[in-house]
Image: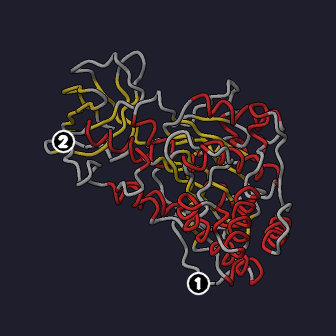
Amino acid sequence: MSAGVIRSIRELVTLVAFDEDSPQIGEILLVGNQNRTPLMVNHLASGNIAVCLNILNDHTLQKNMAVQRSGRSIEIPVGSAVMGRVFDALGRPLDGLPLPAAETLKYKNIWQVPVQGMSFKAKKPELLETGVKVIDFFTPFVKGHKMGIVGGAGVGKTVLIMELIHNVAKSGEALSFFTGIGERIREGHELYETLKQRDLLKNTSMYFGQMDQNPAQRVLVALAGLTAAEYARDSEKKDILFFTDNMYRYVQAKNELSTILQQIPSEGGYEPTIFSDIKLFEDRLSSNENGSITAVQTIYVPADDMTDPAVQMIQHELDGTIVLSRRVAEEGIRPSVDLIRTTSSLLSLDIVGERHYDLSVKVQAILQKHESLKGIIAIIGENELSPDDRADFARARALISFFSQSMFVTEQITGKKGIYIAREETLRGVEAILEGSMNA
């Protein structure tokens, strides 16, 4: 392997000159200093210049230091050894426990996209029960599809995804992979401790690149978690639940790197490659003949602006969107789901069945009527409504209350015991309210 020399250093960007035999994009270069600092090749410039990212943010680098090619990209441990463990973007343990012996570990290149075999065999949609009433009713999870939890800051996105991980891990039906991108360290620690205390770590693997880390690590951690999930699907023939918190932070980290690399932004201020960045990531969250990947992603909405270009692009890749509302949260309803704006293409007759579908149509009609009646009531009062309108308004209020639910992951905060509600029980409760029983 040829050697290069550092020509310039600017923030995370390091330019390395090679006389010949330029490195590959994505390859790791090792600086000839005491730390053997790894540099990742981002792209190649004219004159045999490798534009690299200082992924560990090592400040000991100096101009004219020698750099050696490694011939390898970032490789992370995969397989059964990663279950129950917590890793960073480079596959290094964060839980204080050692890795198994090197000879027993399998490693996989995070840039190596599995070859997808073409399969036209139609499979019957398989519902995944979450135990959260509002999700199982309005946005049913279907194996191999993608769901998004959308909302502004502080409306409960992370809490809801933690609850879903808890309930799925409890069922033990699939392996869970969680990637924390640019979120709070505290939240990752709380998730780990919650699963550990309830003995649910054995079916979960976690990857964290939190908000205190540089944008390169926040981008790479998403690919690290995805690579481990792909291996479990393809080599171990497992069904996977892949959780991402937060997908918007992935775009944000990409945008920061774009600024550091002095790329001209696109309209809206995001990186020029925003569409391909999202598309390439989402396309790897796929299912094949080996197993399925069911994805759940939280999406932060900057300034509660649902028309933000990044939010819109991510939503286009999803089969369903659970919208969390600040207005609903202020009413004390948890989870704070906006029942009107929450939508799913999977809430169809052939997937959920006639009973569930018919109930969803009736519920949406009553909720829409409730929205229109609120303005009238604000002016003339509820007593001036017709008996039918008053009854429908009361049913809508009962439904809104019904879909509120205590969660396991907030037991220590609220003092209320978490509950798991089966889909059948949810449907019976909705039927009872629609038939006039307000105590369902």
Residue on which the image places disc 1: 120
Kind of residue sitting beneath label 2: Asn
User: Which is nearer the eye, 171 or 290?
Assistant: 171
Looking at the image, is 341 positioned above or below residue 357?
A: above
Q: Report whether 211 appears left or right of 310.
A: right
Q: How far across and how far down the image is residue 306, in percent? A: 42, 55
Q: Nearer the viewer, mark 1 or mark 2?
A: 1
Q: Residue at x 60, y 67 (%)?
A: 145
- Residue appearing at x 57%, y 46% in the figure: 225
Residue 159 figure quarter: top right
Task: Tell me if label 1 and label 2 are in contact, CB under 8 Å.
Answer: no
The amino acid pointed to by label 1 is Phe
Residue visible at 74% across and 55% down in the picture: 401
Reading the image, the residue beneath label 2 is: 48
Vertical arrangement, residue 389 with respect to residue 29, above or below: below
- Quarter of the image where one finds residue 260: top left
Q: Which residue appears at 79% of the width and 42% of the height?
A: 408
Q: State the image quarter where residue 129 is shown.
A: bottom right
User: Which element is circle 1 on?
Assistant: loop
Task: Give the answer, above or below, for where 5 lies relative to 161.
Answer: above
Q: Could you tell me residue 171's position as x and y percent? A: 82, 54
Image quadrant in which the N terminus is located: top left
Which structural element holds mark 2? Answer: loop
Q: Does any portion of residue 291 appear in the rendered image?
A: no
